[in-house]
Every structure is written in C-alpha cells, then in structure tokens.
Image (cartoon, rainbow, N blue to C red):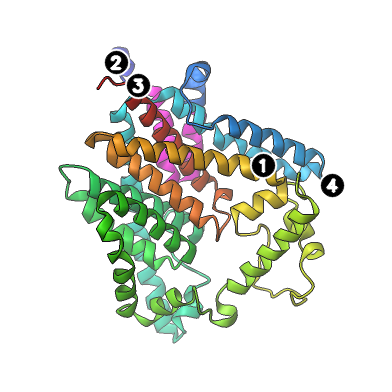
C-alpha cells in the first residue's frame, strides 16, 4: 500500500487539483492549494517561474504600501488575504512534471467545466419556464438572475466558461488526432457561455478565439466577424437584444451608463492619487466624493460600486499606477512569451500553449469591462494557467532539437 502511494506525484496532483477545481468549487480549490503548499514549499527556491514573476512581488509590496498609507489600513485585509491565491504560482512551478502533467490538469479542468456548463443549461431552462409561466418579460427577469453553473455569480461563471471554451477550441484546432469528446463538450460550453448574457465575457472570448484562428488559418479571421453578424441575425429576440445592447443599451436595463460613471470616477481617483491610490477596499467609501458632478444624485439603486468594473482603472485607483503596471505587466510579459513558444512547439504542446495564451488574452480583454481578477476563481485560473504555460515554454527550451 505504501509503495503504491509513493508512486503518485502528490505535489502535482494537489497543485493541479487546486487549479482544476477552481471552475467547480473555490472551497475545494483552496483546500487543495493548502495541501500543495505543504508539499512543495521546500522546492520553491529552485522552481522555474513564469517570465515577469518578480513583478508579482513588487505588486504585493506596493499593495502593502498603499494599504499602510490609506485612511483605513485595516480595511485592506481582504486584499492582503487574497495573496493566498497567488501561491498557486510557486506551487505549480515547483510541482510541474512535464507536458503530460499539464495535459492531465487541463483535461480535468475541461471535464469540471463541462459539468458546470450542463448544470447551467438546466438552470436556464428552469428560469425560462418560470418566466413564461409568470407572464414576465424574460429579458427583465433574467438579466438580474442569470445562470451561474457551479459558481456563485454569473460573471465568475462566464469567466470559467470562457476559459474552458478557449482551451477546448485550441485543442480542436491544433491537436492531432482530435477526440470527439472535446468538440462535443464545446457545444454545451458554448451554449452556456452564450446564455450567460455576460457581454464583456463574449468580447473577451471573441478576442481569444481571434488569436487562435489567426495562428490556425489566418484567412479565416476575415470570416469570423461575418459569421458573428450572421449569428446575431438568426438569434432569438431576447439574446439578440442582449447582444445589440453592447452598442444600443436599453435604458436602465443595461449597465452601460453605470460603467461609464465608474470609469470617470476611477479616473478622478487616479488623478488625485496616481502613486498609491485611495487604498485597497477604499473605492466604495470614496466613490461619492470623487464621482464627477454631472453624474445624477442620488445614484440609481441598481448601481453597485464596490469596485470599478475595470482591472486597469481599479488597480490604479485603489493601489496606484505602479501596482497596476506590475500586475498587468506580469500577464502581458508571460502571455507574450507563451504565445511565442506556441509557434515553435510540437503538436503535443502547441494546443496547450496557444490555449493558455488565448485564455490570458480573453481575461485581459474582459478586464476592460469587469474587475474579473477580484474573483478568486478567475484569479486562480489566470495565475495557474500562466504558470503552467511558462513551465511548458521553459521545458520546451531545454529539449534538444
């Protein structure tokens, strides 16, 4: 029995489970992360980290500085506590055990995501039937109570669906041979992604898919916008209205004016405190003070401004521009390195590297419309996949040609 247990690579199992479980249960994910920390902490010093990992250390230090200089330092505790999630980086970097281990983690991630997608489709059917039975306008009823799958909020769910969709699309485009299970799962994932009605997620997914198709067949890139327009033309009316609301909002039903107000309020905070911001967790407390005068008072009831729905504005406003440049710089640098490695990679790694780069692009684009890195699930996915991609890229460079 002991010999059998010793044959398992427990560090990569724990770290991989922490990453894969993030699309199903953040509690399970963080328990696995705690186990992974205990199993890998001795190897952290000798691990190969993704490019720009030192920028994360700068981000931590600057966050602590911004918190200490804010009006209420203790209020920053939730953001300090979230540093725990960042430990997926040293855990995965230390536990990485070759491309097969990465493939197993991504497979588990896809399986968990598919189950979440299937559950969300049942949620949609139930909500649609209830709205029909009650004689309610479906758009009005659904926009504030959308499908969540295994997640607690539709934005978090949308981020997980974008992740597994882009990884599955990368597998379908770049891996040979293709197992039928993946394209079949993609149908359910795409349906859940679409029916989630999260517009920023749609745009981020489109950006990630555009990247993948560019490296698969460049000529097909021109067809993608045409296909998107054709798809909108044949959509059911509620979904068509939701898509068109990106450029033609329906008054208070859509959040376009809300996000515009948050954007300009965030800019005012940055202009007043460009170096250290107003302090972590201080945006909501200072919102009314910095909101431009042309924003009507009192603020509409539907508005929520605990954060600014934009990672670039949010990090700059609550911790200062240097902190934002550090965290975003880490993702840009690592994504660029992973994408370059994907071009040179063999078939066994190409789909994984391209898929991870596409997910990172999707997260960075979605971040224009939502503070997605505030969600521990999305943060875990973003950091974990970048670390996995960095390890794959570095491992590839050490293999003789």
Q: Secondary structure at mark 2?
A: loop
| Gap between marks 2 and 4 measured at Cα | 57 Å
Q: Going 73% across and 43% down the picture, which residue do you hit? A: 76
Q: Residues within 10 Å of mark 4 (few under 14, many from 20)?
A: few
* Residue 41 percent across, percent down from the top left: 52, 20
Q: Give the residue number, with chain letter if any, for mark 3.
A: 9
Residue 249 % position (x, y): 53, 79
Of the two numbered discs 3 and 1 on the same chain, state the one appearing first in sequence. 3
The residue where tag 4 is placed is 71
Residue 64 in view, yes or no:
yes
Which residue corresponds to mark 1?
Answer: 323
Q: Tell me which corner region of the image, top left, top right, bottom left or bottom right, holds residue 319.
A: top right
Q: Residue furthest right?
A: 71
Q: Which residues are magenta?
A: 10-35
What is the tally of numbered marks visible in this picture?
4
Give the class, few, some or many, for how many residues have Cα within 10 Å of label 1's Cα (few <14, many ≥20): many
Say whether disc 4 or disc 1 marks the residue closer to the N-terminus: 4
The location of residue 297, given as percent across then percent down, is 77, 76
- Residue 291 figure quarter: bottom right
Residue in the image at 26% along x and 46% along y: 171
Quadrant of the frame with the C terminus: top left
In the displayed structure image, the side of residue 106 where residue 82 appears, left or right: right
């Amino acid at each position: 029995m002991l010999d059998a247990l010793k044959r398992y690579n427990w560090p990569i199992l724990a770290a991989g489970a922490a990453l894969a479980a993030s699309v199903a249960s953040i509690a399970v994910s963080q328990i696995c992360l705690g186990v992974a920390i205990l199993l890998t902490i001795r190897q952290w010093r000798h691990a190969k980290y993704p490019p720009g990992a030192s920028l994360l250390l700068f981000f931590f230090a600057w966050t602590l500085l911004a918190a200490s200089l804010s009006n209420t330092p203790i209020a920053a505790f939730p953001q300090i506590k979230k540093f725990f999630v960042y430990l997926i980086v040293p855990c995965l970097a230390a536990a990485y055990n070759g491309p097969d281990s990465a493939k197993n983690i991504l497979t588990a991630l896809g399986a968990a995501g598919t189950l979440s997608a299937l559950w969300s489709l049942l949620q949609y059917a139930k909500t649609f039937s209830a709205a029909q039975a009650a004689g309610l306008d479906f758009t009005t009823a659904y926009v504030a109570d959308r499908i969540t799958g295994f997640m607690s909020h539709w934005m978090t769910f949308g981020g997980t669906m974008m992740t597994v969709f882009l990884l599955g699309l990368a597998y379908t485009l770049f891996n040979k041979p293709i197992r039928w299970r993946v394209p079949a799962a993609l149908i359910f994932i795409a349906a859940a992604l679409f029916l989630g009605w999260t517009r920023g997620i749609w745009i981020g997914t489109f950006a990630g898919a555009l990247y993948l198709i560019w490296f698969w067949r460049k000529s097909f890139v021109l067809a993608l916008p045409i296909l998107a327009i054709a798809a909108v033309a044949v959509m059911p009316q509620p979904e068509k209205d939701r898509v068109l609301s990106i450029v033609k909002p329906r008054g208070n039903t859509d959040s376009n004016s809300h996000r515009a107000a948050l954007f300009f309020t965030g800019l005012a905070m940055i202009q007043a405190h460009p170096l250290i911001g107003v302090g972590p967790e201080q945006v909501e407390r200072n919102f009314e003070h910095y909101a431009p005068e042309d924003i009507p008072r009192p603020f509409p009831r539907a508005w929520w401004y605990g954060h600014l729905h934009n990672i670039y504005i949010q990090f700059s406003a609550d911790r200062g521009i240097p902190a934002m440049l550090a965290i975003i710089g880490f993702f840009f640098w690592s994504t660029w390195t992973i994408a370059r490695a994907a071009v040179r990679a063999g078939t066994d790694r190409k789909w994984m590297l391209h898929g991870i780069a596409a997910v990172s692009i999707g997260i960075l684009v979605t971040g224009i419309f939502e503070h997605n890195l505030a969600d521990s699930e999305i943060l875990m996915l973003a950091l974990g996949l970048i670390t996995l991609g960095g390890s794959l890229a570095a491992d590839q460079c050490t293999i003789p040609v």
